[in-house]
Amino acid sequence: MDKNTLVSKVKEGMEKSIKSLQDDLAKIRTGRASTNLLDDVRVESYGSRVPLNQVATMATPEPRLITVNPFDKSQLTAIEKAILTSGLGYTPNNDGKIIRVPIPALSEERRKDIAKQVKKIGEESKVAVRHHRQEGNTKAKAAQKEHGWPEDEVKRANDDIQKLTDSYAKKIDELCAAKEKEILSM
């Protein structure tokens, strides 16, 4: 393994951390309707529990409303029950054809709590990025012993990995700041 391969593997791990952060942030409620809010809802369908998006199409026709249109109308009550029991705090309205899920406005206190949650998720992502940095540095030291890397090659690898770490930490801060702004400006 050479230095570039090591650095690219570390970068790949950090990219996964960023992707995970983006997925987590997409699920956080901002007061605006988003189909991502229902991503974790599982529906009892034909004897198995499946994600909601596999039994229905979802849309956001209004800023505070999600519509759920089942592929099979006989699944309406199962979908409604799944949303009610999901623990998300939404009360779906079933009109016999489509389910409407109104998204209530957030109180100021709740917005601040959610902003704290965003910071916590951001910190967890930074920890994951630092973990990838530590792994990369450890592998560079191991390569020095196993493959005879010169000391300056290990130093360059560590420097490159640190630059990656700094850029990904900055990216995490930017993503979290944008989400906090979105939450607090509602």
Image (cartoon, rainbow, N blue to C red):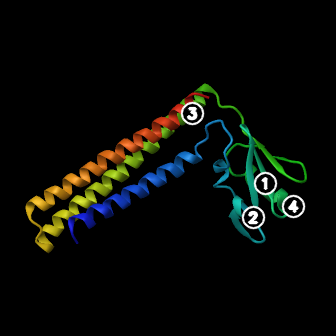
Query: Mark 4: which amino acid?
Result: Lys
Q: Residues within 10 Å of mark 4 (few under 14, many from 20)?
A: some
Q: Secondary structure at mark 4?
A: helix
Q: Residue furthest front?
A: 4
Between 2 and 87, the one nearer to me in the picture: 2
- List the residue tagged with mark 3: 183
How far apart are the two marked residues, 1 and 4, measured between alpha carbons? 14 Å
- List the residue tagged with mark 1: 81
Instruction: Provide residue 183's location: percent of width, then percent of height.
Output: 57, 33
For the point 49% across and 36% down, the residue is 178
**Of the residues under marks 4 and 3, which one precedes in the sequence?**
4
How far apart are the two marked residues, 4 and 2, measured between alpha carbons? 14 Å
- Tag of residue 44: 2
Tag 1 near tag 3, CB within 8 Å? no
Query: Mark 1: which amino acid?
Result: Lys
- Tag of residue 34: none
